[in-house]
Amino acid sequence: MNALGEALGEICAAVLPVPEKLYHGNQGSHVAVCTLSSMKLLGMIGCSKIMDNVCVAGRLLSENKGIDSIIEYVSTGSVNTIVVCGMDVMGHRAGHSLFKLYKNGTDEDGRIAGSESPDPYLASPAHKIDYFRLNVTLVDMMGETDLGKIHKVSSRLSASCS
């Protein structure tokens, strides 16, 4: 990320703070849910039976630090499947970049190969990116906000991981 991007990020964080939200559920599950920019959906999932099937539910707003956070979280080995649902962030396209990372990895500069996001550079070390790509399955439900459909998929995945 360049200096101008960092400065603008700091200004945005001060003017329009987005609360960090992470809901913890069934710690015996290896399934997580990522609602991308759909904060209302995340809140509804956090208070629903979906949390019986997943270990954690959170959101993804940026194509760099947000994806680095997911890579760090899954490197502990507690998650092997992420259901990616909700609406992608306009402009940043963090969900798009997450799937491009999964498919293509990064180049030698840490840029997510094939990403069309404005600043898709990761700080995560190569071995953690490799772990993510080899040991985690992404389930593409981008655009889906129906709790019933998300619950059905998370139930099936949780049962298959048991």
Image (spheres, rainbow, N blue to C red):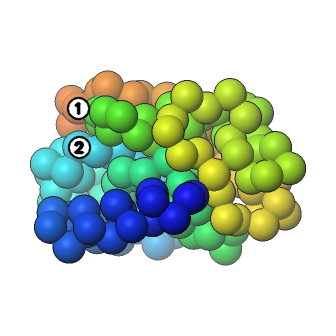
Residue labelled with disc 1: 145
Query: Does 156 sit left or right of 116 as displayed?
Result: left
Please state which of the two labelled residues, at mark 1 or mark 2, is closer to the viewer. Answer: 2
Which of 91 and 7 lies nearest the eye of the viewer?
7
User: Label 2's element?
Assistant: loop
Q: Quick check: 49 above or below 104?
A: below
Disc assigned to residue 38: 2
Q: Quick check: 156 above or below 122?
A: above
Name the amino acid type tagged 2. Ser
- Residue at position x 86%, y 50% in the image: 108
Counting from the top left corner in percent of width and height, residue 160 is at 59, 43
Among numbered discs 1 and 2, the one appearing first in the sequence: 2
Disc assigned to residue 45: none
- Residue at position x 31%, y 33% in the image: 90
- Residue at position x 77%, y 41% in the image: 105
Name the amino acid type tagged 1. Thr
Q: Badge 2 local density, few (<14 within 10 Å), some, or many (20+)?
A: many
Counting from the top left corner in percent of width and height, residue 67 is at 54, 55
**Quadrant in the picture for the N terminus:** bottom right
User: Label 1's element?
Assistant: loop
- Residue at position x 45%, y 42% in the image: 94
The image quarter containing residue 74 is bottom right
The Cα–Cα distance between marks 1 and 2, rounded to whole angstroms, is 8 Å
Query: Are the residues flagged by discs 1 and 2 in contact, CB closer than 8 Å?
Result: yes
Query: Does 1 sit left or right of 155 as displayed?
Result: right
Is residue 85 at all visible to an observer of this figure? no
Counting from the top left corner in percent of width and height, residue 89 is at 33, 38
Query: Does 136 sit left or right of 151 as displayed?
Result: right
Counting from the top left corner in percent of width and height, residue 156 is at 47, 37
Q: Badge 1 local density, few (<14 within 10 Å), some, or many (20+)?
A: some
Residue at the limit of the structure toward the front, as seen here: 4
Question: How many numbered tags mark residues here?
Answer: 2
